[in-house]
Image (spheres, coloured by chain):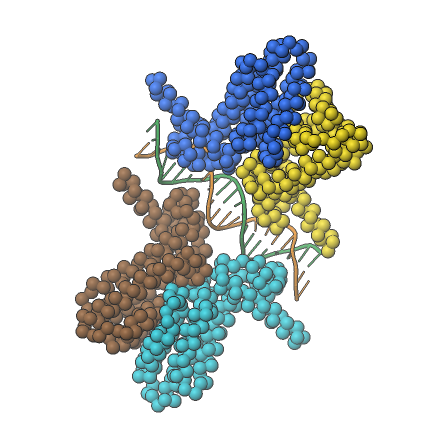
Chain colours: A brown, B cyan, C blue, D yellow, E orange, F green
Amino acid sequence: MKTEQDRGEARCNQVLDAAADCFRQRGFHGASMSELAKAAGMSVGHIYHYFENKEAIIAAIVERDVAEILALLDSLHDEEDILQALIREAGNNLEEATCGSDDALQLEVLAEATRNPKVLAMVRDGDRLARNRLAETITKGRAMRGLAPLADLEARSEIIIALFEGLTCRNVRNPGVPLDAIATVLRSTLQNLLET
Amino acid sequence: MKTEQDRGEARCNQVLDAAADCFRQRGFHGASMSELAKAAGMSVGHIYHYFENKEAIIAAIVERDVAEILALLDSLHDEEDILQALIREAGNNLEEATCGSDDALQLEVLAEATRNPKVLAMVRDGDRLARNRLAETITKGRAMRGLAPLADLEARSEIIIALFEGLTCRNVRNPGVPLDAIATVLRSTLQNLLET
Amino acid sequence: MKTEQDRGEARCNQVLDAAADCFRQRGFHGASMSELAKAAGMSVGHIYHYFENKEAIIAAIVERDVAEILALLDSLHDEEDILQALIREAGNNLEEATCGSDDALQLEVLAEATRNPKVLAMVRDGDRLARNRLAETITKGRAMRGLAPLADLEARSEIIIALFEGLTCRNVRNPGVPLDAIATVLRSTLQNLLET
Amino acid sequence: MKTEQDRGEARCNQVLDAAADCFRQRGFHGASMSELAKAAGMSVGHIYHYFENKEAIIAAIVERDVAEILALLDSLHDEEDILQALIREAGNNLEEATCGSDDALQLEVLAEATRNPKVLAMVRDGDRLARNRLAETITKGRAMRGLAPLADLEARSEIIIALFEGLTCRNVRNPGVPLDAIATVLRSTLQNLLET
DNA sequence: GATGAATGAGGTTTCATTCAT
DNA sequence: AATGAATGAAACCTCATTCAT
């Protein structure tokens, strides 16, 4: 019984993994159900045992995407020197991006949110959690350094997130920029936002 | 003859205006040629007199989009106090975004660039022009203020653009943030990047 | 052993009851096997233990339907005053119909018979039995009243059945007609057909 | 322009004729759009220029069907001896039916009305017109014969229509009945209903 | 220049049926 | 006996594109 349920879940993830790949490469609406099925190693019809329709798959992908960001933020929260970890993560983000990670999917999600209310709601809910988490993390990090609480915490968080999201965009428009030069400026900008 | 050509161009723009609207609302792949035609007040078939196919329309939209950004940058170039103008423009951008301007289209373009090589090339070409222009503008602005040339000019430009693009993303994920709080932090961040 | 067989039969009827419901509500082709399964409280696959395929279920439903009519006729046969019972039954039929009984299924069967030879054969076989039974019943009823045998018995039976089937149709097209007014005319028409 | 519109209408009817055929032979839900298209000598996609979806075609067929009955009733209205014409028409109806005319379609419509509210509404609207027309016709016919108006006109009309619709059903269940025998009984029954 | 009828491929989705467990 | 995962064909429908007028 347990195995059975596990198997179901595994099969579900099989679909989601395949879907993420397809969506990355061809977009939500460019990828066809038969492409998904082929990529998932499953018949088209059977995908509908696990997902009500294509939009439900999109929603599940968005949910995963959101969870991933939250997980990253959570991992930061338990670092020893939080502020430094945040700044370090910035660099990693850059490298990852260069390796062509999930940029495409992130942009796809954002573009879809623009016209799909269900996706928009998920994106906004996720973002609310994420930015609250970031704010807490910053506050905790500053406290650990003996810095005063910030009156403009919300705005600073917003700008910091914007920076990161913006770098995702930059990675599409201008991937050729030297990483270390960027990292230096990024780090100093973040320091300015986090430690003053 | 001249009138004739003008008329043709006007008809062309009629299509592009309609296309921009449709693409904003439904995405490149979600908008159908017949929707475009209806929005443009023109028959489906006739659109093919002006554009070889749908992709050509997308390309033209992307081109326009790129040109718009360049125009904005150019307008800055002739300001009296360039650095201040840049910072001011940040605020405008925020307000515009709130009004739900072209965010959707920008994201659509970026997502499309991710998988359409032709679009990617256009986006990157445009971006190259834009960031060079910004670099020049910054240099000129600093010179007018008597500040020294920047060794890390490229990286700073990159971060500045990232900030702006990031705010476009933020506008989708979290449109409810108070503008003036953001603007203050944004301005101080830009000052830090431009004037030190 | 006997219990086992009984259980099988009960399961079978469970399917047929569910099928009748589904077919009534959605039609033979509109009802899916998985709907049937859900309504029968049984897995899709298991239905195939009892019925070779969907058409076999349809056939069984048709058979039941035919049997039901025959049973009604048989019950009439043992009434004391047969002719009066026939006429009375007309009224009941009307009321039943109003309550939206099996009209839908009857029409579904008839429509299906139109294109499914197997169903057509069943319907016609059943009808042959039914109309012969009715003819006998009429003859017996007339004899009990001391009336002479009818030379045009077959045609009269036919018209009487037509009247009843027609009222089923009317119930769909015009359910709002006052029952008692109809019943009066119906009764006098039947009297004319049965007692003269 | 006129020609153009005519052509469109002709093409529309081309679809409806084909659809009527297909629906008769395979039922509303048994006939596929590609069958319709083949029968109409037209591509599947193009049918959707004329009809929004399959249901719209069904609706149009039902409308035609209703109109046909109304036309028949109207033609009776201008006969010299209306009552006699009504009775005569009964015979014709029988013959027609034997030739396997529209019985199948009529039953299909009725069965569909049972579960499709839009079709039900059309059927009922059509029937209201038809039975009012019949009532008027009967009244006029009786007046021409110098007979008194009927107090139970509505109920009698109802029974008369039921007879005709019932004969349509009978034609499926028992087509082998000798026509003239039936016609005699039918005629006498109608006389009883119309002329007394 | 301008229309819209026409096509056919391909999209998402549903479904009867099978089969390993 | 009983399940439900799995399939693949076929359903309805949409769409970019072409072409005669």
Residue D146 in the image: above or below residue B98: above
Q: Which residue lies at the image location 48% right of the left edge and 61% below the top edge?
A: B27
Q: Which residue lies at the image location 34% right of the left edge and 62% below the top edge?
A: A127
Picture quarter with the N terminus of chain B? bottom right
- Count of labels shown? 0
The location of residue C106, given as percent across then percent down, is 55, 29
In the picture, measured across the screen, residue D1 lies left or right of residue D162, that is right
In the picture, measured across the screen, residue D88 lies left or right of residue A173, that is right
Q: Which residue lies at the image location 34% right of the left edge and 77% below the top edge?
A: B184
State whether residue A11 appears in this view.
Answer: yes
In the picture, measured across the screen, residue B56 lies left or right of residue B157, that is right
The location of residue B84, given as percent across then percent down, is 39, 83
Q: Quadrant of residue C111?
A: top right
Picture quarter with the C terminus of chain B? bottom left
Q: Quadrant of residue A80?
A: bottom left
State whether residue B154 appears in this view.
Answer: no
Residue A115 in the image: above or below residue D105: below
The location of residue D3, given as percent across then percent down, is 74, 52
Residue B46 in the image: above or below residue C175: below
The location of residue A188, given as percent across then percent down, is 27, 76
**Front residue of this view, candidates B58 and D48:** D48
**Front residue of this view, candidates B45 and D112:** D112
In the picture, measured across the screen, residue C191 lies left or right of residue B99, that is right
**Front residue of this view, candidates C189 and B167:** C189
Q: Which residue lies at the image location 36% right of the left edge and 53% below the top edge?
A: A60
